[in-house]
């Protein structure tokens, strides 16, 4: 099973997965951003967003399938995935391979997202880079909020302002996993 935790930048995806990890110890954590970072070192990304690379989408799905097949364990995926075509492409490949996908989306108001992004340090040793990343994330907030309306029909929407333990409880109850499940 793949548990994909989606949402705008700053919605709490990684925080939720960090909360889930000790409560669901058999689950693996897979961050598709690492695939993007690798590809960015090898090829040019004309749009600046590695999700626009067809190879990124294919590799993300294939590696997720491989993790499930090789290790027989659930996989937690904290990754913003807002383009409905890209989501359909990745989730379609997963389902074609017989992998169950549980898709969760964290809904968070704009003001909260901005405050969370402002409170993060992305490149502590490079203030200019830190600000570029912060601006990039903020420039995508509106798209992240709007994406909620065009995601797959089986997406489970969660209130991203709940505490991480409350969110983890909700996810674990939906997937029937973790301590006490």
Image (spheres, rainbow, N blue to C red):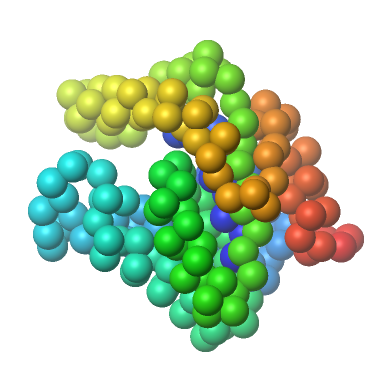
Give residue 73's position: percent from left, percent from top: 63, 76
Residue at image location 79% in from the left, 55% down from the top: 174
Give residue 77's position: percent from left, percent from top: 53, 57
Residue 15 shows in this picture: no
Is 68 rendered above or below residue 171?
Answer: below
Q: Residue furthest right?
A: 180
Residue at image location 13% in from the left, 46% down from the top: 46
Residue at image location 50% in from the left, 66% down from the top: 92
Residue at image location 51% in from the left, 62% down from the top: 91
- Between 125 and 19, the residue placed more toward the observer is 19
What quarter of the picture does the C terminus occupy? bottom right
- Between 157 and 113, the residue placed more toward the observer is 157
Is 170 rendered above or below residue 100?
Answer: above
Give residue 53's position: percent from left, percent from top: 25, 56
Is 87 rendered above or below residue 165?
Answer: below
Give residue 30's position: percent from left, percent from top: 48, 62
Q: Residue furthest top?
A: 111
Instruction: Give left or right: position of 140 versus 72.
Output: left
């Amino acid at each position: 099973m793949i548990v994909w935790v989606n949402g705008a930048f700053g919605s709490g995806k990684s925080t939720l997965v960090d909360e889930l990890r000790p409560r669901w110890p058999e689950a693996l954590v897979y961050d598709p951003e690492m695939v993007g970072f690798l590809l960015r070192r090898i090829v040019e990304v004309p749009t600046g967003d590695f999700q626009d690379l067809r190879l990124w989408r294919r590799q993300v799905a294939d590696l997720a399938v491989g993790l499930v097949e090789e290790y027989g364990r659930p996989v937690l995926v904290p990754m913003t995935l807002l383009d409905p075509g890209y989501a359909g492409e990745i989730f379609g490949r997963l389902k074609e391979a017989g992998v169950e996908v549980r898709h969760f989306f964290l809904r968070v108001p704009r003001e909260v997202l901005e405050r969370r992004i402002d409170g993060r340090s992305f490149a502590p040793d490079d203030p200019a880079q830190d600000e570029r990343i912060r601006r990039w994330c903020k420039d995508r907030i509106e798209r992240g909020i709007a994406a909620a309306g065009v995601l797959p029909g089986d997406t489970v929407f969660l209130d991203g302002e709940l505490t991480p333990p409350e969110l983890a409880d909700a996810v674990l109850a939906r997937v029937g996993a973790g301590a006490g499940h």
